[in-house]
Image: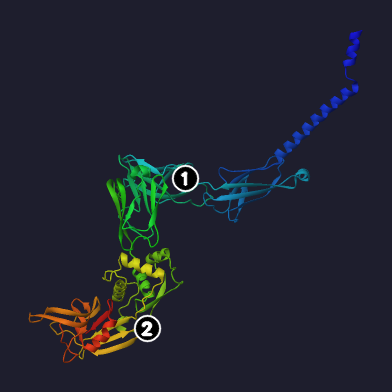
Amino acid sequence: MALDTLEQRAAPPPARRRSAYALVLATTALLVVVGLAVAVLVWSSPTLGPSRTALARIQLPVFAGSLVRATAFAPDGTRIPLTERDGQLTPKTKLTPGESVTVDVVVKRPGWLSWALGSTHTERLTVRAPLAQISDPWVTLAAGAPLRVSFGAAPARVRSTAHFSRRSRTLSFGRPAAAAGSLELRAAARRWERLGQVQTVSWFPQSSSPVLVATPGASSQLDPTTPIRLTFSQPVAQAIGTTLPRIEPHVAGSWRETDSHTLVFTPSGIGFPLAGSLQVVLSRSVDASQPQSVSTQPTKTIGYSVAAGTTLRLQQLLAQAGYLPVDWTASAGPVAQTAQAETVAAIDPPAGSFNWRYADTPAPLQALWTAGAPNVITKGAVMTFERQHGLAVDGIAGPKVWHALLAAAIAGKRHTAPYSYVYVHSQVPESLTLWSAGHVVLRSPGNTGIPSRPTQPGTFTVFEHIPVGTMSGTNPDGSKYHDPGIRYISYFNGGDAIHEYPRASYGTPQSLGCVELPLAAAAKVWPYTPVGTLVTIVD
């Protein structure tokens, strides 16, 4: 009886049991609703991700709706048009390998979802256009083995400096003609990409010593701004130690290690000496490959020649600096007064035109001028420039002349002395005419060489200019002469010179090849005939 009473007290009342059941049902319903909501959200959210063949891939689940718009943008904001097929988004214009691209897609949701989640949904993805990279750019070949180059993934397109056959990720170039060397290629990982940057592959023979491939090859001719690339079969530090190579003669520039096996020297300023030569000197001996050689040779030096500037650019520089009787005007404006611009122009002259500086230029002088071709006017101007800049006077535009010319052009320096010219008529009565800066300064009778020692006709350049000196030689009868104190001497052809010499008369052949003048005339002429001045002897 007591037990029954206790059990009746422990049992919950009916109302409380109904409340618990309701709570369970509500919780279950809530979970179902939440699950459905999550499912709807998952099945209605588009997924934008990378693609193995296209730029990006859009996936539209069951409730996602339809694609309204897909656009892509370059880093500078330029729009990249896309095509969509089976969710693959492909550029209509070619991209640069490695280029960063932002892709935006807009999806329109179904009507029954738009009231809750909005009518559209936007996804954004930033991707990089893939790169077609060479797996190993340094290849050691056994004797007679073909050169094979492999990529991390099969490229869509390849362009190379050498012929090749292709199988998936590997290119075969056959057996190289040289024991060591390098080739360049460009590749694109996708059809919708441009070809990528130049990649260099170097091959080396099996050797106990480090092997070097120099690009350009040893003994090649360089442009003044051409970088020199040294690629070793071993890492640089292992091949030559930590001491960088040196350039002889010294050239401004810098070495940089572009990868573990490669050093590149980039000249700065005016660059390598035009019309000169140079050597790259290593700290240790290596086995170096010569172009098209089937063997390598141990060496510590790699030699090069440097291209000369063109005759046309030489004349342009001399004209704009005031050393010629012509002016020069560039068709597209003057060359920038920078080392790089002037150096490039030395090899590839700009278009332009030459015009005579003076209206009254003597016809014999005009006949000597040819633009773009070596001539005595250009030689004389070079000699004048050499003397003005303390260089050896030979009339040849060598490395030092080009260096000084380019430096003068960059600094905007101009020679201010007037252009002068002397021509001598050897027909009796013989005379000398001095022309300068568009005017005849002087006409004077003079004496040229006797028939047995005639003054050679032609145009010559003054190579020595002295106010007073001693003239010695041999007379026609074999006796010697020694005449000190000869004044106002300008040598122009071997021992022939314009100078003063006392005679009873002038205007007939009396000298041993020189052009003799009265003292007053010689004094007048001498300041106008420095080194480089042209002297024409006319029959």
Taking depth in this image into account, of 88 and 287 the one nearest to the observer is 287
The answer to whether marks 2 and 1 mark residues whose Cβ atoms lie closer than 8 Å is no
Mark 1 crowd level (few <14, some 14–19, many ≥20, 10 Å Cα): some
Q: Nearer the viewer, mark 2 or mark 1?
A: 2
From the viewer's side, name the closer residue of 13 and 167: 13
Q: Left of 511 or right of it: where is 135? A: right
The part of the image, by quadrant, that contains residue 313 is bottom left
**Label placed on residue 358:** 2
Q: Disc 1 marks which amino acid?
A: Gln
Q: Is residue 417 visible?
A: yes
* Percent position of residue 31, x then y: 77, 31
What label does residue 196 carry, if any?
none
Image coordinates for residue 211, horizontal then vertical, percent: 32, 44
Q: From the viewer's perspective, tell me whether residue 521 is left or right of residue 51.
A: left
Is residue 504 shown above or below 142? below
User: Mark 1: which secondary structure?
Assistant: loop
Q: Is residue 352 above or below residue 286?
A: below
Q: Which quadrant is home to the C terminus?
A: bottom left
The disc placed on residue 133 is 1
Give amino acid for label 2. Answer: Tyr
Circle 2 Cα neighbour tier, 10 Å, few/some/many (<14 / 14–19 / ≥20): some
Q: CA distance from mark 2 to mark 1?
A: 62 Å
Counting from the top left corner in percent of width and height, residue 535 is at 26, 81
Give the mark nearest the N terminus, 2 or 1: 1
Kindly identify the residue that appears in the image at 90 percent across and 14 percent down.
8
